[in-house]
């Protein structure tokens, strides 16, 4: 609980001070796709900030349900290793697939998490499928699948029904 409060405080201070400019965008008022995906122009921001933000968001969703905010998703993607140039596309795909809900299930329960991954992909990426509800794990596996497709000459985002 203390870590969650500290991460939230760091986030609020960062937003108010402009230290994390571009990461403080939220969903549009009507709850549809973000009117503007978070301006992603500061990948050099402290990984510690992003780690705390992602952990606090996961704790909040684990406890109360719901979905991640745009700011939280940026942090999850950065911690999971997504490169700067793919963050906006990854945000759009994850939004379309799950509305950034880490416990989303689709395809009759065969697709899970923020990126709606199939169980077999977790083993390919060296992750335990039981951890599908961890946004960080789900994003890390999604990036592995994305790289797998690219390395084999497939089109970007081949494995997803949602495209950026």
Image (cartoon, helix red, strand yellow):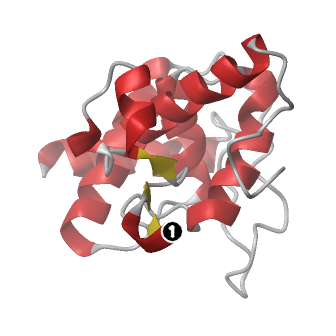
Q: Secondary structure at mark 1?
A: helix
Residue 29, horizontal then vertical, whole percent: 72, 84
Q: Is residue 107 visible?
A: yes
State which quadrant residue 109 falls in: bottom left
Outermost residue, top side: 151
Q: Mark 1: give few (<14), some (14-19) or many (20+) Cα within 10 Å.
A: few
Residue 57: % across, % down: 36, 53
Q: Nearer the viewer, residue 121 or 71?
A: 121
Q: Position of residue 79 (x, y in %)?
A: 47, 26
- Give x and y (percent) for residue 48: 40, 22
Above or below, comparing residue 104 to residue 44 in the picture: below
Give the quarter of the image for residue 121: top left
> Which residue is the extreme one toward the left?
1
Q: Which residue is mark 1?
A: 107
Quarter where residue 119 is shown: top left
Who's the residue at 55% across and 50% down the image? Answer: 115
């Amino acid at each position: 609980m203390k870590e969650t409060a500290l991460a939230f405080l760091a986030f609020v201070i960062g937003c108010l001070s402009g230290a994390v400019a571009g990461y403080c965008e939220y969903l549009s008022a009507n709850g549809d796709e973000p009117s503007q995906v978070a301006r992603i122009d500061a990948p050099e921001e402290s990984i510690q900030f992003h780690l705390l933000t992602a952990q606090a968001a996961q704790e909040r969703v684990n406890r109360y349900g719901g979905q991640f905010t745009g700011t939280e998703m940026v942090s999850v993607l950065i911690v999971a290793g997504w490169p700067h140039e793919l963050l906006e596309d990854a945000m759009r795909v994850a939004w379309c697939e799950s509305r950034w809900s880490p416990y989303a299930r689709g395809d009759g329960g065969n697709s899970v998490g923020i990126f709606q991954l199939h169980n077999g992909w977790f083993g390919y990426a060296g992750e335990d499928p039981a951890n599908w509800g961890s946004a960080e794990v789900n994003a890390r596996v999604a990036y592995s699948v994305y790289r797998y497709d690219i390395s084999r000459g497939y089109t970007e985002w081949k494995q997803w029904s949602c495209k950026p």
